[in-house]
């Protein structure tokens, strides 16, 4: 039964957007609200898991019984997450991590001068891929994908490349899906090739279905 499956399990959830500093007063980020990750953390805690929620800046309240760690950048998120890589039973990466960060953030505030201003960006570490490729076979890795083109194909490719048990494909276009809203439209793709397209649901309901499906991978 679902309740039993999560009892006492260590679950780590990443959530929200990271912020990548340009200078001391500016950053690069995205529109992720953190709602999907917070819903997953809340649901897992309700099921009896020991939940650590590693989150970027968000306006959301910490769910009941969840240990929350606030971070700013992708690299800070990685440092926080790595501390749980060996001990966690399940790692759920719901964060919208910035793919790139400014190569060398300026100290203080950049002064306005030229008409064209260039910022060099460098790639951030892929937190989920690092976990997935070093996890033991008993640990479960779950990721999300938001794809503008060839969604199914790209999501399956990510599932394989990051060594995931399950990937949650977010609809990029359907009404009621994606950033900031309280609902989502997703397709669950298991490493066993199983596909489950869910109708429009609240993020809390989506979280429950994800956890139920994920619990099968505990073995
Ligand atoms: O490759 P892509 O960014 O589309 O993969 C999305 C998934 O990987 C999400 O689960 C996201 O949380 C995770 N991710 C991560 N670290 C990154 C980029 C993505 O954990 N630097």
Image: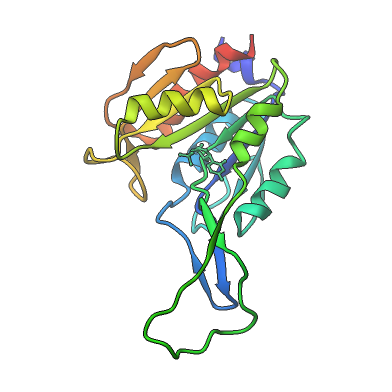
Quarter of the image for residue 11 reads top right
Q: Position of residue 152 (x, y in %)?
A: 34, 25
Residue at 56% x, 84% y: name it.
Answer: 109
Q: Residue at x 27, y 31 (%)?
A: 200
In this orientation, does residue 70 appear? no
Q: Tell me where residue 143 appears, x and y as whole percent.
A: 51, 31
Residue visible at 52% across and 66% down?
120
User: Where 138 falls versus 17 (above or below)?
Assistant: above
Q: Would you say 58 lies left or right of 197 here?
A: right
Position in image of residue 206 (x %, y %)? 40, 29
The answer to whether 146 appears left or right of 214 in the picture is: left
User: Is residue 205 or residue 197 the one in the foreground?
Assistant: 197
Quarter that holds the C terminus = top right
- Furthest toward the left, the residue is 175
Apparent side of residue 73 relative to residue 167 in the rendered image (left or right): right
Write down the quadrant of residue 89 in the picture. top right
- In the depicted structure, whether residue 92 falls above or below residue 95: above
Looking at the image, which is closer to me, 122 or 13? 122
- Image coordinates of residue 161 in percent, x first then y, are 54, 27
Q: Residue at x 66, y 32 (%)?
A: 131
């Amino acid at each position: 039964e679902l309740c039993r499956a999560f009892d006492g399990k260590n679950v780590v959830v990443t959530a929200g957007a990271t912020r990548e500093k340009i200078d001391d007063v500016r950053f690069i980020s995205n529109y992720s609200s953190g709602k999907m990750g917070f819903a997953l953390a809340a649901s897992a805690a309700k099921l009896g898991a020991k939940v650590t929620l590693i989150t970027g800046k968000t306006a959301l309240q910490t769910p009941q019984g969840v240990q929350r760690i606030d971070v700013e950048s992708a690299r800070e998120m990685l440092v926080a997450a790595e501390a749980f890589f060996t001990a966690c039973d399940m790692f759920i990466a719901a964060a919208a991590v910035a793919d790139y960060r400014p190569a060398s953030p300026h100290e203080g505030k950049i002064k306005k001068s030229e008409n064209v201003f260039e910022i060099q960006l460098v790639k951030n570490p892929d937190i989920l891929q690092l976990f997935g490729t070093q996890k033991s076979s008993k640990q479960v890795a779950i990721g999300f994908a938001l794809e503008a083109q060839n969604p199914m194909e790209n999501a399956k490719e990510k599932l394989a490349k990051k060594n995931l048990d399950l990937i949650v494909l977010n609809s990029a276009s359907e009404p009621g899906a994606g950033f900031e809203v309280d609902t989502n439209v997703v397709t669950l793709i298991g490493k066993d090739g199983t596909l489950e397209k869910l109708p429009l649901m609240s993020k809390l309901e989506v979280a429950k279905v994800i956890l139920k499906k994920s619990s099968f991978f505990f073995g």
